[in-house]
Every structure is written in structure tokens, then in C-alpha cells.
Image (cartoon, rainbow, N blue to C red):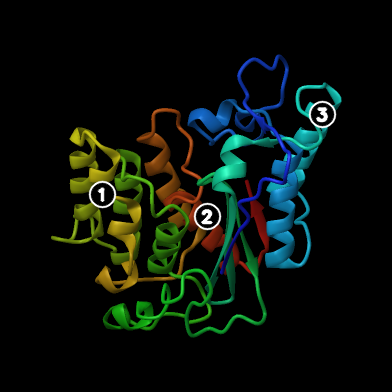
Amino acid sequence: MSQEQPRRPSGQQAAGGGGEQGAVRYGDVFPAVSGGLAEKPVAPQDAATMQSAENLVFGQTLRGGPAAAMQSAATTNERMGVVGHDQATDATAVQGVTVAETRVPGGRIVTEFVAGQAVGQYLARDDDATAGGGAGAGAGAGGAARGGSAAAGVVDNTKVTIGEALEATALAAGDEPVERSDAAAIQAAEARATGLDANVPGGLAAQAQSAAAANAWAARDEDKTTLGDVLANATAKLVADKPVESADALRVAGAENRNKGDGTARPGGVAASMAAAARLNRDEAVWDQ
């Protein structure tokens, strides 16, 4: 499920983020945020909007989550006189925030977005989640997955597989263009799933590498192939699958980080989803930010 809260209360001003000296900006709170949003100061109504979204989805504000971090930053900015109590950042007021929840066997993957950019992801064990497949924001994400890997052997239906982790990436960061680092991570994930050293002809890694190469030359963003294009129904596209283990997550994270200019993983990306799945498979509930 997802809950969007595009809200601009009557009479509010939008915080621009141009020349506020010493302001706590989105880039300070969430290092992975980029573009104009990173330079904007966190405003009180931004935090209130995220709190409302978390409350609607979870029934409470998550401890240590994006809403709590935004509230702390907004309070600091208000005390400094950088923003007013009724101010909202223009991007947040117009584009809103989204909390997306995806069911996976044994739990759920939750990703939170501000103005379309992922600011947090965590994976929590859910005793009510059934082992048969996904529901919620990514309905169908786990449905065909088990059948697609049956030929490779028996898969533990209580654990998140590599294919399902890739499908979670398609949901969390599906609109992001495929980059070289994404292709490297997908190649590593496919290799861990299949046990093969070479790419599967026409497989996920081959598709991702072609997409990354084409995207590098594409003039317009709308012409670029996205992670969602490549990873949708990923489990059915894998010739083999397996539950995600820590070693798998580490190998994928290494591949993604080595091929990214700043050496950081994409929020909601392949490495992040693999790490979350590995932790869930160890029966831990973890917050990733």
C-alpha cells in the first residue's frame, strides 16, 4: 500500500532553500537525496506531512524514521528563524510524500519518499504475512516468483529470495534510470542466484548492462530504461533462485559501490534490498536509512 500526502495548508509559504545560512537541509539529513531538494531546508510542515503518512500506514510515527529525523531538523531550523512554523518546502508541498509497503514472505519492505526521492527503507518481520507471496504496494511481486525458480530446486518459502529482493527494488526505485552501478549489482545478484560465472543470454544482467549503456547516451530522461523496466517480475526471469544470505548481500553491495562514483549505495536499490532481505531472513527487524 502507499499513502500520498500532497498537502499545502491554507496561507502557508513555501520554503525556498536559497540563501538560508546554517539551515539544516535535506542533503544534511538524507545524504542520498540529490538535486534541488538536497539544498532546501527542512520545514515544519514537511515533517508534519511525513508524520501523517507514517501514522496512516503504521498507526504511529516510526522511532528513528524519516519523520522523526525531519521533525528534529525542522525544529532546529525554526529555532534559528530560517523557516516559519507554517512553512512547507515547495517540492514537498506540491509533490508530497509517499510511504510504500510491500509484503514479502515473513515480513514487509517499507520505503519512504520525499518529493519522489527515497529517504528511508526498512524491512520488518510481520507474523501476519503469509509465506505464499506478496501483497500491498507491490501486489504480484512475489506471486510468480516461486514457480519461476522451481526447476532450480526446492526454495524455502519462508525466506526472501534474490528474485524477490530484485522485485522489491523495482517497486522502491523502479522509476530510476539504470546506471552502471545498478547493472553491476544486478549482475552480481544474478550470479549468486544461478551459481554461474557468465551472464545468462537475455537474462537480467544482460538486460541491465544494455540498458545502462543506452542510458549513458540518451538525451532525455524519458528515453531511459528504468530499474522497473528491467527488474519487474525478476524472479520469473531468473533461471534459478535462492534465499538471500549475508554473503550474497555483501557481494552485491561491493559490486554496486565499486561502480558508483561516490561509492554509496542507491536508496531502495539492489544492494539496499538485498541487505534488507538478508536481515529479514535472519529474523531481524532493522531500520535502514
Mark 3 nearby-residue class (10 Å; few <14, some 14–19, many ≥20) = some
Which comes before the other along the chain, label 1 or label 2?
1
Taking the spot 52% from the left edge, 63% from the top edge, the residue there is: 277
Q: Nearer the viewer, residue 120 or 137?
A: 137
Q: Is residue 285 above or below residue 46?
A: below
Mark pair 1, 2: CA separation? 24 Å
Q: Is residue 213 above or below residue 23?
A: below
**Is residue 254 visible to the viewer in this orientation of the structure?**
yes
Tell whether 71 sits left or right of 271.
right
Mark 2 nearby-residue class (10 Å; few <14, some 14–19, many ≥20) = many
Q: Nearer the viewer, residue 186 or 108?
A: 108
Amino acid type assigned to the residue bearing label 2 in the image = Ala
Q: Which of label 1 and label 2 is nearer to you? A: 1
Q: Which of label 1 and label 3 is nearer to you? A: 3
Which comes before the other along the chain, label 1 or label 3?
3
Q: Which of label 3 and label 2 is nearer to you? A: 3
Mark pair 1, 3: CA separation? 41 Å
Indicate the position of residue 70 as horizontal and vertical percent values: 72, 40
Tell whether 199 sits left or right of 166.
left
Taking the spot 56% from the left edge, 84% from the top edge, the residue there is: 130
Tell whether 80 sits left or right of 202.
right
Amino acid type assigned to the residue bearing label 1 in the image = Thr
Residue located beneath label 2 in the image = 275
Residue located beneath label 3 in the image = 78
